Amino acid sequence: MLFLMSAAVKLFLLACDEVIIVDEIVGNAAVTLIWSVTLIRSYVIASKRVQALVRNIFVLEERILKSGDERLIEIYNSHVNQNKITNIIILVVTSARVSQIRVLKYILNNFETYATKIRDQLSCSQEEASFITLRQCILKHKEIIWYINEYNAVFRYVTFLDFFTKFCSVDRYLLTTSYGE
């Protein structure tokens, strides 16, 4: 936080200087922005909403892994395991949801098989089992929508700031290469 404040003061002093050095101002602005985004990202990731999202992921993952359905487990694991590069929290949050969408799609594509499993488990008619299966799919879909809305609400500004920082970095590069010619 102290570094961010000192970078902002330095930016102010550079902008108020009699001789304006564009490269220094743009460079300082980019660094100040990057540190601001980092600070905001840290705050967002430590928030209770993100913690709730991560807890939700663990619950859903446990449900799928305990289901005993090898195909659902394979779908879930294949997507989660594909993405182990950077930004672990955002990656896990996103990957878990995408895998949930793929699981839901698989169940809908194999609806009769899952309705029959429900029928056998609950000893009910095929029609009741189909209704229960459809209801579970609708509830899962609503859960995915809630989760995505929550994710968007939590990460909206961080994503914007990330984009803006990258834009400023490109802008700085273009300015310095043009200025140097």
Image (cartoon, grey):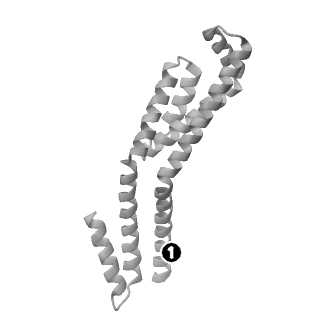
The front one of 66 and 126 is 126
Q: Is residue 15 above or below residue 111?
A: below
- The answer to whether residue 95 is left or right of residue 127 is left
Residue at point 59% right, 41% down? 145
x%, y% of residue 82? Answer: 51, 37
Residue at point 51% right, 42% down? 94
- Residue tagged by mark 1? 174
Crowd tier of the residue under label 1, counting other residues whose Cα lies within 10 Å: few below 14, some 14–19, many 20 or above: few
The front one of 56 and 34 is 56
- The answer to whether residue 14 is left or right of residue 82 is left
x%, y% of residue 4? Answer: 31, 67
x%, y% of residue 166? Answer: 48, 64
For badge 1, the amino acid type reads Leu
Residue at point 51% right, 29% down? 77
Q: Quadrant of residue 32?
A: bottom left
Where does the N terminus fall, quadrant-wise? Answer: bottom left
